[in-house]
Amino acid sequence: MLRWLAEKRIQDAIDRGELETYEGKGQPFPEEFFAENPYVPENLRQSFKFLKGASFTPHVLLLKHELDVLRIRAKSKKLTAEDRRELEREISTKAIEYEVRMEFYRSSLGG
């Protein structure tokens, strides 16, 4: 229920155009993002913090973020049927790439 409410509020803000000018748009993720990011397995957090310090954002994090944005955009009522199909194909492709990359990270850690 809470997740649905959060997604609804985000989608409403997107529909109203409120997220086009949010503070921090186009800026690097804050340090706290890498320290407590729920998408980063706990055993990788220190490595990701090190990489962030070297101005490197792991591709898998960027990919997950893109995937989340696409999924939110797909819920828009303003999409044409063709746009929706194209977006769903892109989501499917990115989801597969994300899962493959995460499996690589897991297997490289012996997990």
Image (cartoon, rainbow, N blue to C red):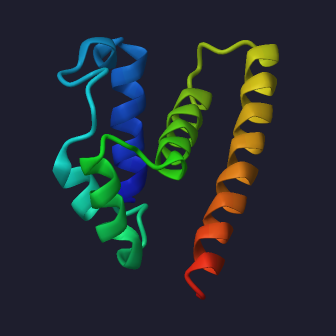
Q: Nearer the viewer, residue 82 or 24?
A: 24
Q: Position of residue 46 (x, y in %)?
A: 29, 69
The N terminus lies in quadrant: bottom left
Q: Residue at x 80, y 33 (%)?
A: 89
Q: Position of residue 54 (x, y in %)?
A: 30, 46
Q: Is residue 86 above or below residue 2?
A: above
The C terminus lies in quadrant: bottom right
User: Furthest residue to the front?
Assistant: 54
Q: Position of residue 94 (x, y in %)?
A: 69, 42
Q: Residue at x 42, y 17 (%)?
A: 15
Q: Residue at x 41, y 64 (%)?
A: 40
How many numbered marks have been drawn onto this rendered protein structure? 0
Q: Residue at x 60, y 88 (%)?
A: 110
Q: Nearer the viewer, residue 47 or 71?
A: 47
Q: Is residue 39 left or right of residue 13?
A: right
Q: Is residue 40 left or right of residue 33?
A: right
User: Furthest residue to the bottom?
Assistant: 110
Q: Is residue 70 above or below residue 79?
A: below
Q: Nearer the viewer, residue 49 or 35?
A: 49
Q: Is residue 43 left or right of residue 111?
A: left
